[in-house]
Image: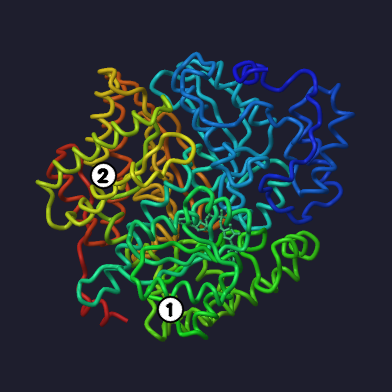
């Protein structure tokens, strides 16, 4: 059966053969036992809803086995025979091109070279799901293949509720992931309701079909490392010969070594999972791998004395690296961590002293003991970091909930005021004031032709536009623009593409609109094929996350989620092709609300009108909120935008004098 036939048939009428469990690929860890016997029956009953009753006698026991064995029902039997990757847009059976673009993005998120646990439909972050099971995938693709511009597909946490009549200007797909009544949004609620098959954790870009491989994060990480380097620079010197230590070579964390190389430092990234380490090494994302700590120390010292630019992976637990470097007096200039601590009890963070297999076994069979082991490790981790920071290391939280979970584990990690942590988050110190408050965020695009020539042409267009804009840019944003021009000029050379022909570029509202308009024109002129625009949810306006994207909001509103909700609603009627809103992306279920969009540029006047209207709101919504929180950079940016755009009228804050406030109580 070819790809088109596979998509058009949806859920097959006759059962495909049951395939053996493929041990050659990276699988999700077994999820913990959470359901009662009655709830397990409900989970199987729920899964069987997708299939004709004549198959229930075969599928019922099979799904019960999956639930017992893996903690979830993935419906492995229905994994498509055809290869999963983003085929060019014309290869999808479709009645409307927007739907074909969405199929392309779904395929990319399930590509084995891109996805972390492809058979469990997990793209990244250990639990960032595109769908809960293969039945949902097959049905969704079939709906998309048949939908017209007069319909909208509504996705409930991976489940396609159906096609509803709408209109040409409406989004073709509306996605929600993990939307819960607030009281049911604790980590175990995800375990339970996901096991029942009624909700999923969409991460940020997995469940919104916008993940583009680790490139998406290389750029942000490069900017972060560069600016962290500027913070530790005493005499204006760069990162040459300086050491950056971190952990994680997974979905997003795998970008760290590459970012370290682009920023020009020595990086050491620890990774416990050998499959992840060697996958990144084979892909060329990390230069060298060491499994022995003494050899690692010797290699790092050599790199320091030669001022090499090199990325080194340590195959093992990161805590061992922090402790060893302390014993051996290896000075760390910059330190961070990107283990998946948004998901500490289900495989996001591995305790020291156990192999990955031992940990996985303990996680499934003795979750309480596993929790104790994780918390012991977190305390050790924090102590080792502190030893280094007392010698002068600049440590920042990389938005993975390291500080949050370490504090919950009782580590000595709180500042003296008992409210803040000892170390800043990268958003508080770097990303917030330097990027988000000015509207700079991770704009991205995918060339749907699948041609690398198209990507090269879009890079050139974007570089020309930014270079032009730099000439007129105010001093406040010149550094950001210069970093982004440097990035886009070198992007092709840095071979960042894994999966679809995609590019990421931090840009502000004006830059995003100008670049997108120029792409649309190039499509109209036949210079390139259609382009999908999008962004990470991790952006100016998409995400309310008090320990990350909104951690530099200090008016008390960092725990509210109005901005993300306005964003998704606002984008939906301004022309987005699809919109999504998620609970939990990045830092964990219940900790954040995040939203995003996708938009197809097809060279038409409609596309130009939509992009201008939607991108303007998509960025300025967040700047307005950041400005209302009294963030100076955002006040500057929104005033500048109001000067340019007469229809924009934003409420500006008045500042109260400290003396007046301090004498009130
Ligand atoms: N702020 C950002 O822009 C940003 C960017 C990327 C990631 N993050 C956060 O970083 C985390 C990682 O994301 P990801 O997609 O790479 O997740 P991932 O699960 O794909 O990768 C994390 C990796 O850490 C490894 N690991 C876990 N415990 C370890 C330990 N003790 N020592 C060494 N390695 C260990 C795991 O084996 C895994 O491969 C997430 O929480 C994510 O939300 C934030």
On the image, the x and y values in percent for residue 596 come to 43, 41
Residue 24 at least partly seen = yes
Q: Residue at x 81, y 35 (%)?
A: 45
Alpha-carbon span between mark 2 and mark 1: 37 Å
| Image: 472 above or below 453 | below
Image coords of residue 9 (percent x, y): 67, 17
Q: Residue 175's x, y, as percent?
A: 52, 36
- Kindly identify which numbered label has been placed on residue 422: 1
Furthest residue toward top: 95
Give the label on residue 489, or none.
2
Q: Secondary structure at mark 2?
A: helix
Location of residue 385 in the rendering, given as x and y in whole percent from the top left corner: 49, 78
In contact (CB < 8 Å): disc 2 and disc 1: no
Q: State whether residue 591 appears in this view.
A: no
Give the residue displayed 50% in from the left and 64% down from the top. Answer: 269
Question: Badge 2: how crowded within 10 Å, few (<14), some, or many (20+)?
Answer: some
Q: Residue at x 26, y 73 (%)?
A: 233
């Amino acid at each position: 059966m070819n790809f088109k036939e596979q998509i058009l048939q949806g859920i097959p009428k006759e059962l495909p053969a049951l395939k053996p469990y493929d041990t050659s690929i990276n699988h999700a860890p077994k999820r913990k036992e959470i359901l009662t016997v009655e709830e397990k029956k409900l989970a199987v009953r729920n899964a069987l809803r997708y299939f004709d009753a004549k198959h229930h006698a075969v599928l019922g026991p099979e799904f019960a086995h999956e639930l017992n064995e893996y903690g979830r029902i993935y419906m492995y039997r229905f994994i498509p025979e055809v290869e999963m990757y983003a085929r060019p847009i014309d290869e999808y059976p479709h009645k409307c091109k927007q739907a074909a673009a969405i199929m392309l993005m779904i395929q990319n998120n399930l590509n084995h070279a891109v996805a972390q646990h492809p058979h469990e439909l997990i793209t990244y972050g250990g639990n960032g799901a595109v769908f809960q099971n293969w039945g949902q995938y097959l049905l969704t693709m079939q709906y998309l293949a048949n939908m017209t511009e007069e319909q909208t597909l509504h996705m409930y946490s991976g489940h396609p509720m159906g096609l509803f009549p709408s209109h040409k200007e409406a989004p073709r797909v509306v996605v929600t992931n993990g939307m819960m009544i607030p009281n049911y949004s604790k980590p175990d609620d995800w375990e339970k309701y996901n096991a029942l098959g009624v909700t999923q954790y969409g991460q940020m870009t997995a469940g919104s079909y916008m993940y583009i491989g680790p490139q998406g994060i290389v750029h942000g990480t490069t900017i972060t490392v560069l600016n962290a380097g500027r913070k530790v620079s005493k005499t204006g010197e760069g990162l040459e010969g300086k050491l950056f230590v971190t952990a994680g070579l997974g979905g997003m964390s795998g970008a760290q070594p590459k970012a370290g190389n682009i920023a020009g430092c020595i990086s050491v990234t620890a990774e416990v999972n050998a499959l992840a380490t060697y996958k990144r090494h084979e892909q060329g994302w990390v230069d060298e791998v060491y499994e022995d700590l003494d050899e690692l120390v010797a290699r790092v010292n050599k790199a320091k004395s030669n001022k090499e630019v090199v990325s080194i992976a340590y195959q093992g637990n990161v805590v061992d690296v922090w402790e060893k470097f302390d014993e051996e007096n290896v000075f760390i200039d910059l330190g961070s961590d990107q283990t998946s601590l948004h998901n500490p009890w289900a495989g996001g963070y591995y305790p020291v002293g156990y192999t990955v297999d031992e940990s996985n076994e303990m996680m499934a069979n003795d979750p309480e003991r596993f929790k104790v082991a994780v918390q012991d490790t977190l305390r050790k981790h924090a102590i080792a970091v502190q030893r280094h920071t007392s010698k002068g290391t600049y440590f920042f939280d990389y938005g993975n909930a390291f500080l949050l979970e370490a504090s919950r584990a009782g580590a000595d990690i709180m500042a003296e005021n008992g409210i803040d942590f000892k170390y800043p988050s990268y958003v508080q110190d770097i990303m917030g004031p330097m990027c988000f408050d000015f509207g700079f965020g991770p704009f991205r695009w995918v060339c749907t032709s699948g041609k690398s020539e198209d990507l090269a042409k879009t890079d050139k267009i974007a570089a020309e536009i930014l270079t032009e804009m730099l000439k007129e840019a105010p001093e406040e944003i010149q550094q950001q623009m210069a970093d982004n021009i440097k990035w886009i000029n070198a992007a092709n050379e840095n071979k960042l593409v894994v999966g679809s022909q995609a590019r990421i570029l931090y840009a502000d509202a004006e830059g995003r609109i100008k670049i997108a308009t120029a792409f649309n024109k190039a499509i109209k002129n036949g210079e390139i094929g259609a382009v999908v625009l999008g962004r990470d949810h991790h952006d100016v306006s998409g995400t309310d996350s008090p320990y990350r994207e909104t951690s530099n909001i200090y008016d008390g509103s960092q725990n509210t989620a109005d901005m993300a909700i306005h964003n998704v609603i606002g984008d939906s009627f301004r022309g987005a092709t699809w919109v999504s809103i998620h609970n939990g992306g990045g830092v964990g279920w219940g900790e954040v609300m995040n939203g995003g969009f996708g938009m197809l540029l097809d060279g038409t006047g409609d596309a130009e009108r939509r992009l201008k209207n939607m991108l303007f709101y998509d960025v300025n919504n967040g700047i307005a909120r950041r400005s209302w929180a009294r963030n100076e950079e955002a006040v500057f940016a929104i005033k500048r935008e109001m000067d340019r755009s007469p229809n924009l009228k934003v409420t500006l804050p008045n500042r109260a004098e400290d003396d007046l406030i301090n004498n009130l109580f």
